[in-house]
Image (cartoon, coloured by chain):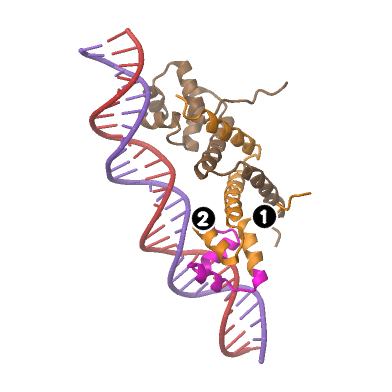
Chain colours: A brown, B orange, C red, D purple
DNA sequence: TTACATTTGGACAAATTATGTCCCAAATGG
DNA sequence: CCATTTGGGACATAATTTGTCCAAATGTAA
């Protein structure tokens, strides 16, 4: 098996896990990336979504893969939206098809 | 084959196709669902996304399946987001897994 | 062409939502 | 205990969304 892609879950949970490994308090990480301690706490427990900028800074701070974390952020947003709307996950299949459709057929008059 | 689920693409395109079949001008449909003509035009050409309320009203007006159209709306939102971010569609798989994860593991302490 | 209706596009105000901070209470750990 | 970290709510401000208005473009028919 060549794949090691599996991750637990949300960006928040991942960030908390990483921070706990380093034994740093919220305060330290938060100030060093320029946000309020309280906000970072909320991000870690999925009470707020990080912005792309914040994800980039956190990735840099922890020296982890930025692109990967940004993907996690986007998939979080989709997942939370599905839960919030209580929608069916087969919507993702439809969306996938639409992406293909829009990529090809879209600039045709 | 039991499935007849295939649709062309976006909500906007579907709405325009339906309206053209009925030969009604934007003005008629728009006023009858209580929005500006210009806004409906923008929705039909994907320049704006309809709100859920508008989708419901349009479904009622055209006598088409409301739930189905609402699903189309949500998948549109996902698809446009992917295009806007120039992201990879495999993000949908990740999101799908997260939905499952959050549905089960989420209220555990 | 002219006249009339539809469609499109931009600019804008108003409404809604997201973002970040502050402050204090609760929990944790010495 | 005390000191620190973490959690949670209220809030101002920023950013985005939503809808309208108006005018220009396009279409249609005589």
What kind of element bears circle 2?
A: helix
Left or right? Give the position of C25 relative to A32: left
Q: Position of residue C18 (x, y in %)?
A: 44, 43
Given residues A82 and A35, the one toward you in this image is A82
Mark 1 or 2, nearer chain start: 1
Q: Quadrant of residue A3?
A: top right
Give the label, 1 or 2, closer to the camera: 2
Whole-Å distance between the Cαs marked 1 and 2?
A: 18 Å
Given residues D3 and A9, the one toward you in this image is A9
Q: Which secondary structure dominates the residues rendered in magenta?
A: helix
Q: What numbered label is drawn on residue B9? A: 1
Magenta part of the protein: which range?
Answer: B20-48
Give the crowd class for mark 2: few <14, some 14-19, many >=20 residues within 10 Å. some
Q: Position of residue A99 (x, y in %)?
A: 66, 47
What residue is drawn where x is 63% and y is 68%? B19
Left or right? Give the position of D20 relative to A9: left
**Residue underneath mark 2:** B52
Q: Is residue B69 visible?
A: yes
């Amino acid at each position: 098996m060549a794949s090691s892609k599996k991750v637990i879950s949300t960006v928040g949970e991942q960030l908390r896990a990483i921070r706990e490994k380093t034994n740093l308090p919220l305060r330290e990480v938060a100030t060093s990336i320029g946000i309020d301690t309280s906000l970072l706490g909320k991000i870690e427990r999925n009470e707020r979504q990080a912005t792309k900028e914040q994800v980039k800074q956190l990735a840099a701070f922890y020296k982890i893969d930025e692109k990967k974390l940004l993907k996690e952020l986007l998939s979080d947003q989709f997942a939370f939206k599905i839960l919030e709307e209580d929608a069916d996950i087969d919507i993702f299949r439809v969306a996938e098809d639409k992406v293909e459709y829009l990529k090809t057929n879209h600039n045709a008059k």
